[in-house]
Image: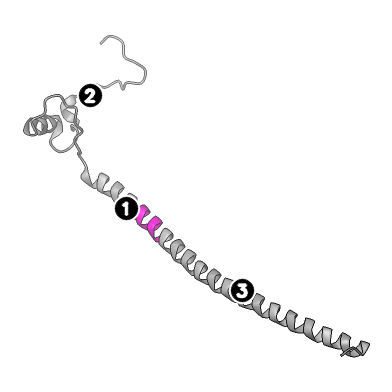
Amino acid sequence: MGQQAAFLPNKEIKAEARPATGAGGLARLNTQSKISGQTGGNRRHVQDTSYFVGLLSNKINAITTEIDKLRIESENIVTESKRDKKMERKAKNLATEVQLLEDSLADYNLAADKGRSGVN
């Protein structure tokens, strides 16, 4: 190594001084693949399960929150639907009452007109 790159330190780094990945190092990965019967390494090994458990917990919490929001929205829709039906019945009853009162008023107006004109 006559010429070093500018980004490399000037002192020599010993590979033995640096820890390998995880507690078991690279040998642990090979052992796990032999234990599981894999040779191609096409399957992903989870080194830190707590990370993935945390991700799943976050997703579960988000889904639970969304379910709660949807449940509240559904309850509001049911309540509004009941209120709307009640108001429709009330409006129909009031429309019927208005029609009866208009008919009664027309009868009174007809009687008043007959009384003023002197026709029996």
Residue 66 part of the magenta-drawn span = yes
For residue 47, the mark is: none
| Label 2 environment density (alpha carbons within 10 Å; few <14, some 14–19, many ≥20) | few
Which residue occupies 61% across, 74% down?
92
Which residue occupies 27% across, 9% down?
2
Q: Relative to 100, does residue 64 appear above or below in the rendering? A: above
Q: CA distance from mark 2 to mark 3?
A: 90 Å
Which image quadrant: the C terminus? bottom right
Q: Relative to 71, does residue 105 appear above or below in the rendering? A: below
Q: Quadrant of residue 89?
A: bottom right
Magenta segment, principal secondary structure?
Answer: helix
Q: Tag 2, which secondary structure?
A: loop
Q: Relative to 27, does residue 113 appear above or below in the rendering? A: below
Residue sitting farthest toward the front:
120
Disc 3 target residue = 92
Residue type, label 1: Ile
Disc 2 target residue = 13
Q: Tag 1, which secondary structure?
A: helix
Q: Is residue 117 left or right of residue 29?
A: right
Which image quadrant: the N terminus? top left
Viewer-closest of 65 and 79: 79
For marks 2 and 1, the one nearer the N-term is 2
Residue type, label 3: Lys
For marks 3 and 1, the one nearer the N-term is 1
Q: How is the image coloured?
A: one colour
Give the magenta part as a residue range: 61-68
Q: Is residue 2 left or right of residue 26?
A: right
For marks 2 and 3, the one nearer the N-term is 2
